[in-house]
Amino acid sequence: MAGYYHQEDLARFGEMGENAPELWRRFLEWYGAVFAEGALSEREKSLIALAVAHAVQCPYCIDAYTEACLQKGSNLEQMTEAVHVASAIRGGASLVHGLQMRNAAAKVSM
Amino acid sequence: MSNAFPLFEESLRASGLFPLKATGISVFQINVGKLCNQTCRHCHVEAGPNRKEMMSRETAELCIRALERTTIPTVDITGGAPELNPSFRWLVERSRGLRRRVMDRSNLTVLLLSSQAGLAEFLAAHEVEIFASLPYFQEQQTDAQRGAGVFAKSIEALRLLNELGYGATGSGLTLNLVYNPTGAFLPPAQHAIEGDFRRELQRRYEVTFNALYALTNVPIGRFREFLEASGNYERYMTKLAGAYNPNAAAGVMCRYTLSVGWDGTLYDCDFNQMLNIMLDHGAPAHIRDFSMEMLNRRRIVTGQHCYACTAGAGSSCTGASVK
């Protein structure tokens, strides 16, 4: 078996309940409630999930939420903007740590 | 067919619906032929400009004669592009003369053909309800499914219909849009996407409509070819079967529809028609043998493709079957 990620593993996600069924049940119940229509629509929640999937770089989540976004009626423009939001936060998060670099440099510099 | 999901009949049995039976006929659906001015990539009819199958006037007359003997309230005319059948306007006039509600399943672009001059005005004059295919409010997705340039023409046709009063509250002229996914995925909830369509079509093109209906793509015809060529068939079928909803199964449109083929052959639905799965279990085979008594409670012929109409909120020719 080459590599760590296998597309077919996504369908096996349920196996994670085999040795901790109660935790799995609670996870699924909570997960379902999170994605149900509330103050945010299901479509908006799927776009957020797609962005987060890119931020955490989970290929399973990217596959799942690309399809979920399409299925909820989003289009590639909206989905691409969502990925840019994730990228901007990741980029911004790196940049803002530059202040830590500046602080550290200032501390040891004359 | 894969063994990854149960036979549709088994799912029906598990929900106490086997054998599936009609609950009366309230929709008389006439497929007048496979000729179309478009060649859409998802078309279950595999319609196109080169198709020759066309309902004759003689068969159209048999349809009207059958209708006359009933009080079936709705006549649903489909194709192909049904307007291209030389008997289309005759069928509309006769059906309206019988005081039936008439639905035209239009691809929109047909309204702009020079050979169809006055068609939109004709539909308005007879208060025909238009069910217009528009898979998305953007050009890219629409043209990918329906052909290059179709989106722009569809918008032009929608504007023409709006000018005639279609889609305006209180005009009595109903313009409904039909959404279907532009790929191997299920449709969103109707209410969720209708707002997007309404806002975007108004904002971008000043187009208005009455309602949007979301349909699931049925894995037959060109859509099945796409699924197989793109390696999505098994996954799509598994998804459909996994989304089986007993409430949707109880309300499937074949239970209240009779589907007449271009040659007068009778079917339970337009999808069975395209698969050449005729009525069975003792029901009449042809419109010339129409018998309300024998068709009203007929047993319906089902197959694995039926999972498309029972997935999630269900899917019928008028959108979700579980509102």
Image (cartoon, rainbow, N blue to C red):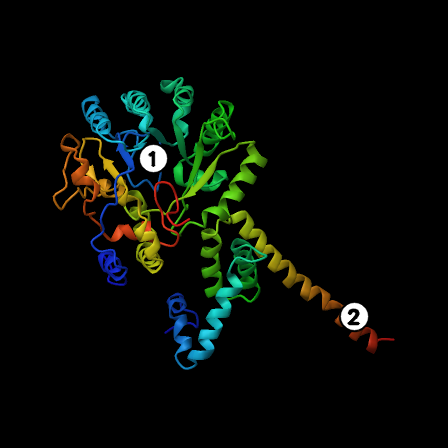
Visible in this render: residue B210? Answer: yes
Q: Name the residue furthest right.
A: A110
Using the image as rendered, state which of residue B207 and residue B94 is in the foreground. B94
Where residue B53 appears, as percent x and y from the top left, is: 22, 30
Left or right, A1 with reference to B66: right
Q: Is mark 2 on a helix, strand or loop?
A: helix
Q: Is B258 above or below relative to A30?
A: above
Can you give x and y, in whole percent of width and height, for residue B261 in the image?
22, 34
Report crowding for label 2: few under 14, some 14 to 19, many 20 or more residues within 10 A (C-alpha).
few
Please state the chain letter of the residue tagged with numbered disc 2 in the rendered image. Answer: A
Point out the image quarter for the N terminus of chain B.
bottom left
- The numbered disc on residue A8 is none
Mark seen at residue A102: 2
A100 displayed left or right of B113: right
Residue type (three-letter) at the residue carrying disc 2: Arg
Question: Residue type at mark 1?
Answer: Thr
Q: Tell me what residue is drawn at x 34 percent, y 44 percent.
A: B316
Identified at 50% across, 39% down, the residue is B137
The chain letter under disc 1 is B
